[in-house]
Image (cartoon, rainbow, N blue to C red):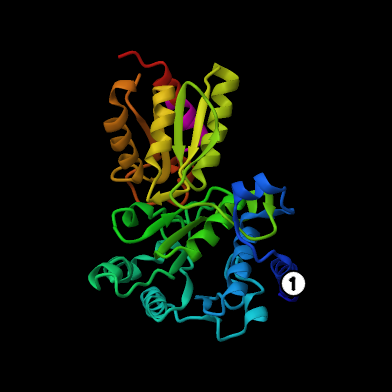
Amino acid sequence: MAALQQTAAADAAAAAAAAAAASPATASLSQCDQQQQPEVAKMNFCNAVNSALHIAMGEDPKTMCFGEDVAFGGVFMCSRGLLERFGRDRVFNTPLSEQGIVGFAIGAAAEGYRPIAEIQFADYIFPAFDQITSEAAKYRYRSGGVYDVGGLTIRAPYGAVGHGGHYHSQSPEAFFTHIPGIQVVMPSGPREAKGLLLAAIRDPNPTVFFEAKMLYRTAVEDVPEGDYEIPLGKARVAQQGSDITLVGWGQQVRVLELAAREVAERDGISCEVVDLRTLLPWDADTVEASVRKTGRLLVSHEAPVTSGFGAEVVSTITDRCFYSLEAPPARVCGYDTPFPLIFEPLYLPTARRIADAIRSTVRHHG
């Protein structure tokens, strides 16, 4: 435990130093690249989130972070160093009550604060569902624009992480994409996570920010050390291609890239990979442009297939691109079952399952 505390303290000091050295000027990632190459550092997903939190807390004294075990750094250590730097008035633990966490955050946002509430696991966000959908999402609308809780950001780790079972593995994003008045963001890597989180915290609309647990330690990229934002509601073409469009978000983007590599090497199939980044609102225009080029569409997510957000993507793109489609759109998703424990490898939409679906879709003849 002492060694863990020393490591956490060292990480916190490094994160605080990096955040303190960051330029106060904010730019989009593309603007940074156009003006000059920003200073970058190797960061995993967790460190990128931590860097964004330090920047957001440092720029606005009304920003606060709280949740279960947040003060000591969180179970995944994403909030490490915040308590030491910003104090207990702004960084604190809460009781084990998701409804209370979100309810308090809504009240703080209504009073002009910028709360960043953490739900320890997305599986446990449902006790707060009414607070999010009936209060946060409707506060501005029902007051005729007089009041809002736009400063609210809710962070929640989601998805498979290695036999987490039914209560530590779920991907509940589709429940929230049905709710007007909030935003839903799901980054696919460290670079995306930092820029999107800073944009979400500063955006004048309440946001649910889902973070893939699988990526916290495994995803490592060059990430700008300073302050930058990635626009919400704008997808990213992660890989250019000509035969089929693959659409995903969060952890699944990396699985799609693995599948694309396999079919390129073995079958000569060229895949275009689109990372949605934001699910509400989602960038249908970018997906439409890609499908008009390739003529084929495959969507993949970890959540169960029935009523998953992939169905919305398929429906919208079919409406927009019906006469451009060379084959029926495909979905490779989780199954319609509670998330299993020992059978997790069979449940997940793996690169192999996706590769088989790519081959079938490309070879389809109507």
Vertical placement of 17 versus 96: above or below?
Answer: above
Magenta: predominant secondary structure element? Answer: helix
Q: In the rendering, at what x and y percent does residue 234 appear?
A: 46, 46
- Which quarter of the figure is the N terminus placed in? bottom right
Determine the image quadrant of residue 148: bottom left
Vertical placement of 110 versus 138: above or below?
Answer: below
What residue span does the magenta drawing correspond to?
349-357
Q: Is residue 356 magenta?
A: yes
Determine the image quadrant of residue 92: bottom right
For mark 1, give the secondary structure.
Answer: helix
Task: Answer with left or right where residue 133 lies relative to residue 279.
Answer: left
Q: In the rendering, at what x and y percent does residue 366 appear?
A: 30, 14
Q: Is residue 312 magenta?
A: no
Q: Residue at x 60, y 72 (%)?
A: 59
Q: Is residue 326 visible?
A: yes
Q: In the rendering, at what x and y percent does residue 244 appear?
A: 45, 25
Q: Residue at x 47, y 74 (%)?
A: 115
Task: Answer with left or right where residue 285 lies relative to residue 201.
Answer: left
Q: Residue at x 57, y 33 (%)?
A: 258
Q: Which residue is mark 1?
A: 13
